[in-house]
Image (cartoon, grey):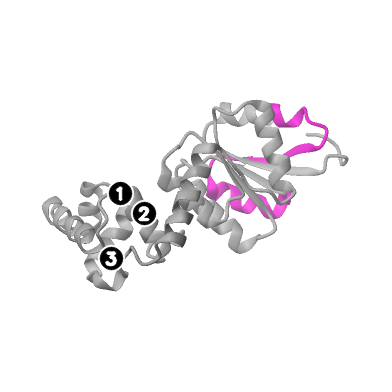
Amino acid sequence: MRGPAASIRVLLVDDHAVERQGIRALLEVQPDIVVVAEAANGLEALPLIASSAPDVIVTETIMPRMNGLELTGQVQRRYPQIKTLALTRNDRQDCVLRIVQAGASGYLLKTVSADELVAAVRAVMHGSRVLQPPALETVLDDYLQRVNDPGSLRPADELTAREREVLKLISEGNSNQEIADLLCLSRKTVETHRGNVMEKLGIHKVTDLVKYAIREGLTGLD
């Protein structure tokens, strides 16, 4: 850990200890960055925020117990002054949209270079947003769809309560079988509900269903 001259205090959150160590080594050779704490998941990270007072949280999105998406939502509600930078193996479009929607200032894949990571930490610290081209394209596509064709998606009140529930679970990344288990339904029944949702909304791709659920507030972060 570096001394008081370091101006950017970073909390690392990743369930892979080796990766955390590598990221820490990359950051701490910088004269203006200090890693003040580490955690293996969001639940471990939350109590460390108060004690370590980070400026930036660098987090994986895929973690047990509490993932990076949930952590970002919690941080933005409790500590809106803290910046969150996702550094992840996950390149799914729905994940990009949901974590940006939750308030993340940046989204990088772990294929970035050391220089790119350091630059991103500095950028988000100073109020900029950092998205790699694929993530930026996803967010822009979503924005343009809403701006250019705001009436293209039908309102969620056309769905039954059960269909809304199934849509929410789909948007959270659950498979048909997982939804069936959670709702105590047969897989065939879930598939029927899923088909009805797509038919009523005129949406036939899972990524578009996720975007719709986010816009309509049907998927939460808690």
The circle on residue 164 is: 3
Tell me the CA gap for discs 1 and 2: 6 Å
The circle on residue 102 is: none
The part of the image, by quadrant, that contains residue 117 is top right
Q: Is residue 76 magenta?
A: no
Of the image marks 2 and 3, the number of the one nearer the N terminus: 3
Q: Which residues are magenta?
A: 26-54
Of the image marks 1 and 3, the number of the one nearer the N terminus: 3
* Helix, strand or loop status at disc 3: helix
- Which residue is painted at 66% across and 27% down in the image? 114
Q: Which residue is mark 1?
A: 206
Kind of residue at badge 2: Val
Residue 149 x %, y %: 39, 62
Closer to us: 127 or 172: 127
- Label pair 2/3, CB-CB below 8 angstroms: no
Q: Is residue 216 above or below residue 95?
A: below
Residue 7 x %, y %: 82, 43
